[in-house]
Amino acid sequence: MRRNEWPLVILILAVGVAYWNLLLPSPLQPYIAVDLGISLGAAAQLVTVSAGAAVGALLVYNQRGALVPPKFIILFGLGSLTLGSYLASRTDDYEMLMAFRVFNGLADGIIYPAAWVALAHYLPRERLGFGNQWILIGTALSSMVGIPLTNHWAGGGDWHIAFRWFSLAGAGMTVLGVALFFAKEHPLPKSQGGGIRLIIQNQRLSRLLAANVFVAVSWFGAITFVGGFLARTYEPSVNNVSWFFGLAGAAFTAGTFIYSRSPAARRNILLVTDALSIPLVVAFFAITGGFWYSVIIAGIFAFFRASGLVIRETMLLEETEQAAARIAGITTVELSTYLGTFGAALTGGIVLSQATYTLIGVLLAACALLSLAFQLLAGTDSTKPTTEHRIQPIKAEVS
C-alpha cells in the first residue's frame, strides 16, 4: 500500500466493524434465549430486525446518498452501531432489544456501500481494483477476529458484556474515522444516485441480483443459526467456540484469494464453488458426529463460499457500472444481499420453532441451488453493453 493511501486502512477497518456488527448476535443467541426466556428462533429475529432496517437505509442511500460525502455517512453509521449496542447492553427486555437493533441495522445498510463509494475519493482510478479486493477481505475480519472476541466477552453467559465491549469498539472506530476528514481527496464530479428502476430493466443484471439474494440466504442464513446449532448440539466450551469462529474466519479469508482477472476463469470458479456449497451447507447442519467435524465442514464451506462471494460481488459491480451511477449500483447490490439476509433470518427462525436444524440446512441448500440456477440463466457473456437492455454508463461517476 502506498504512503498516501492510508485512508484505505480506515475503510477496511470500518467495513470489518460493520460486518462484525451484523454477525454479533450469532454466538450470543443461546445466552440471550436463556436469559430472556425466549426460543432460539426468537433470538434469531434480532438479525431479521437489523437486516430490515438495513434495507430501509439502503433505499434512502440509493436515492439521496449522492448529496452527502461518504465520510459523513461512514461516521454516522459507526455512531449508530455504537449507540445501538450500548442501549442493547442496558436492557433486559426482548422487545426493547429488538428496537435497539434498528440502530445497528442502519449501520449495516450504509457503512459498506459508503466505503465502496469512498474508494474513488481516496484512491486513483488505476488502484480501485486493489482497493475493492481489500474492502472485501476486510469483511473477513469480522468472523476471524470479531466473533471470537464476542464469544470471549460473553464467556460467562452475560451477553450484555459483549454488547458493551462492542459499543466501545464502535466508539473507538468512530474516533479513528474522523481522520478521513484530514485525508487528501481526488477531485471528482458530483456523484449521481437513484437508478434502481434502470438497473432492474437490465435482464442480465436482474438475474445476477436474484442469484445474489439466494446466495445471501444460504450464507448469512448459515451464519445466523450457527451459534444456536453449536450450543444445542455440542454444548462446547468458550474456547472451542472461539476456535470454531476463528478457524472458519481464517478459511473464509483464504478463500477470498481464489480469484482471477480473467472473466471466463472467474465464472468457472463461481459456478464450481456455488455447486460445492450446496451439499456442504446440508452436511454442516446434518452431520453431528463431533464438534471438530463441524469445524472442518464449516471451514471448507467458508473457503468455497468466500471465493464465490468475492467474484459475484465483482461481477455485479462491473455490471452495475454499465447500468447506472456507482452509488445506485452498489446500493442495489447490497439491497439484494440484505433482502436475502432478512429472508434467511425470518424464515429460519419460524422453521426452527417447528422443526430441526437439519431442515434449516436443507432450506439453505435449496436457496444455494436457486442461486446457481439464476447465475446460469444470467449467461456467460461479458459485462460490456451489447443488447438493448444495457444502459449507457454515466461518465461523471468515477472518471
Image (tube, rainbow, N blue to C red):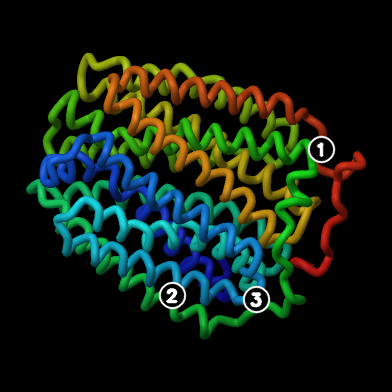
Please name the amino acid that badge 1 sits on. Ser
Asked where in the image residue 205 lies, by quadrant, the reply is top right
What residue is pinned by disc 1?
382
Question: In percent of the image, x 52 and y 85: which residue is there?
Answer: 182
- The picture places residue 351, in percent across and down from the top left corner, at 34, 26
Mark 2 neighbour density, 10 Å: few (under 14) some (14–19) many (20 or more): many
- The picture places residue 144, in percent across and down from the top left corner, at 34, 46
Q: Is residue 328 above or below residue 250?
A: below
- The picture places residue 21, in percent across and down from the top left corner, at 35, 55
Identify the mark at residue 134; answer none if there is no mark.
none
Q: Quadrant of the C terminus?
A: bottom right
Would residue 396 be found to the left or right of residue 387 on screen?
left
Q: Is residue 267 above or below residue 399?
A: above
Q: Earlier in the sequence, mark 2 or mark 1?
A: 2
What residue is pinned by disc 2?
177
Please name the amino acid that badge 2 sits on. Gly
What residue is pinned by disc 3?
67
Mark 3 neighbour density, 10 Å: few (under 14) some (14–19) many (20 or more): few
- The picture places residue 176, in percent across and down from the top left corner, at 39, 76
Q: Earlier in the sequence, mark 3 or mark 1?
A: 3
Q: Is residue 323 above or below residue 243?
A: below
Q: Nearer the viewer, mark 3 or mark 2?
A: 3
Mark 1 neighbour density, 10 Å: few (under 14) some (14–19) many (20 or more): few
Question: In percent of the image, x 40 and y 18: which residue is there?
Answer: 282
Q: Quadrant of the N terminus?
A: bottom right
Mark 1 falls on what kind of element? loop
Tell me the CA gap for discs 2 and 1.
Answer: 37 Å
Q: Is residue 210 above or below residue 363?
A: below
Mark 3 falls on what kind of element? helix
Q: Pick the residue in front: 258 or 66.
A: 66
Question: In percent of the image, x 63 and y 69: which residue is there?
Answer: 64
